[in-house]
Amino acid sequence: MILAALLLAAATPAPPQDPRDAERYSACLATAGAEPAVAVTEAARWRGAGGGVPARHCLALAYLAQKQFAGAALELAGAAREAEVARSPLAVDLWGQAGVAALAGGDAANAVTYLTSGIAIASAPVARAALLTDRARALVEQKRLAEARTDLDAATRLDATVADTWLLRATLARRTGDLKTAEASLVEAAQLAPADADVRLEAGNIAAAQGRTDLARAAWNAVIASAPGTPAALAAQAAIVAAGTPTPSAGAPSLP
């Protein structure tokens, strides 16, 4: 899933209590979706006039609509800091969004920093698990695989109902040669999302790593048949072409 789309679809902070600010916030969000360049100007003016978290959040969404990930991450982090000072429960979500925005912009270092800030104040297991999963993605980008594995282990303990977290754990375990953990994690992911193309792709990758080429080809062909034209299907096709190798690198996508 595209990270920017994930952020744009994320729940926004609660409207301000002041009815005038709430109306301005709603209007700003609508403009951010329809005319992001206009929204940037309006939200920046509002932020400068003391608009606080709502203004910063709207500005961030306008930046995201323009794929200006660095600017979005900075505004979301600023909003998170303000929310944290105000002891607002919105701070956790805002730190998470800041981290994902930074990662979408290729800034894994700041992504780790922002997500760590969110983890430090997250008390709800589901929220903490989501932040740990996203931090694991950023840690993988930094080649800090052992730390990423620790985060994914913790995330699955906190919330075992998210197929994507199990899939990430399976992918990382395969890459580090822990095929037993990879297979066990893949089983969990498949139980939660049996028709997911990325899960089926990883099933083929793990089978190939185990030397079970026929099973790998069957899994990859299932991806191509069920999700033609998708990134997973393209990776599966590449893996089939490279099926002569034990662990087809073409079929090993980056952590989704």
Image (tube, rainbow, N blue to C red):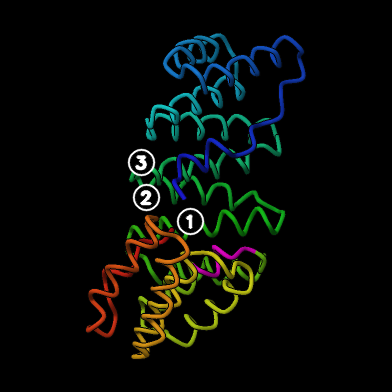
> Gap between marks 2 and 3, in whole Å?
8 Å
* Residue 249 in the image, given as x and y percentages of width and height: 26, 72
In the image, farthest residue toward the bottom: 211
Q: Is residue 2 left or right of residue 15?
A: left
- Amino acid type indicated by mark 2: Ala
- Amino acid type indicated by mark 3: Gly
Give the class, few, some or many, for how many residues have Cα within 10 Å of label 2's Cα (few <14, many ≥20).
Answer: many
Q: Nearer the viewer, mark 1 or mark 3?
A: 3
Q: Residue at x 59, y 70 (%)?
A: 194
> Gap between marks 1 and 3, in whole Å?
14 Å
Q: Residue at x 38, y 32 (%)?
A: 67
Q: Which residues are magenta?
A: 162-167
Q: Secondary structure at mark 3?
A: loop
> Relative to residue 205, is residue 19 depicted above or below?
above
Residue 135 — which label? 1
- Amino acid type indicated by mark 1: Arg
> Relative to residue 252, is residue 131 depicted above or below?
above
> Gap between marks 1 and 2, in whole Å?
9 Å
Badge 2 is on which residue?
108
Q: Does the residue at mark 1 contact the one at mark 3 (Cβ under 8 Å)?
A: no
